[in-house]
Amino acid sequence: MLPSAKVRGKSCETPSAVDGGRCSHADLIVRAWCWAVWAVMLAIALYFFWTRTNPVPQTEDWQLVPAITGHESNTLEWLWSQNNEHRVPLPRLLLYLILKVARANFRAPMLCNIGLLAILAALMMQA
């Protein structure tokens, strides 16, 4: 059950229940504006992804190469090994799985990050 919303002095259970089941004109403009900003930001992120990323490993990405290529003898030990004085087994496992599915294209985790953030932003706007 959604909390009551007041639009122009009328309370309703859902935003679409205003004015006999239709949203007000102002509400539609606000929603359209939010979705337009979301779409523009997603397009900008995808533009920078396609123009600025490189499928070749960079800096710390090289630590993933032995595990992806099968040259790592003990994967569990590799997952628990330190990275800059931290142990990050879950992010390493996620990166490993994404890179295995993407056939070691190091752009795939970046694209997954953009996609997950876009989905999260869309869900937050719906909430």
Image (spheres, rainbow, N blue to C red):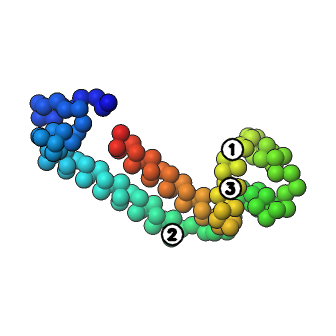
In the figure, 2 relative to 33: above or below?
A: above
Residue under the point 39% across and 49% down: 122
The alpha-carbon separation of the residues under discs 1 and 2 comes to 27 Å
Q: Is residue 86 visible?
A: yes
Residue under the point 45% across and 60% down: 45
Callouts 1 and 2 close, C-beta under 8 Å: no
Callouts 3 and 2 close, C-beta under 8 Å: no
Q: Nearer the viewer, mark 3 or mark 1?
A: 3
Residue under the point 24% across and 29% down: 4
* Residue 22 in the image, given as x and y percentages of width and height: 15, 45
| The image quarter in which residue 60 lies | bottom right
Q: Earlier in the sequence, mark 3 or mark 1?
A: 1
In the figure, 30 relative to 73: above or below?
A: above
- Report the front residue among 1 and 99: 1
Residue under the point 66% across and 62% down: 101
- Marker count (numbered): 3
* Residue 52 in the image, given as x and y percentages of width and height: 53, 68
Relative to 107, is 43 on the left or the right? left
Q: Which mark is residue 97?
A: 3
Q: Earlier in the sequence, mark 1 or mark 2?
A: 2
Amino acid found under the numbered disc labelled 1: Leu
Relative to 5, is 66 on the left or the right? right
Quarter of the image for the N terminus: give it.
top left
Helix, strand, or loop for circle 2? helix
Q: Earlier in the sequence, mark 3 or mark 2?
A: 2
Crowding near pointer 2: few (<14 within 10 Å), some, many (20+)?
few
Q: Is residue 58 visible?
A: no
Crowding near pointer 1: few (<14 within 10 Å), some, many (20+)?
few
Q: Which mark is residue 90?
A: 1
| The image quarter in which residue 105 lies | bottom right
From the image, tell me which residue sits under label 2: 50
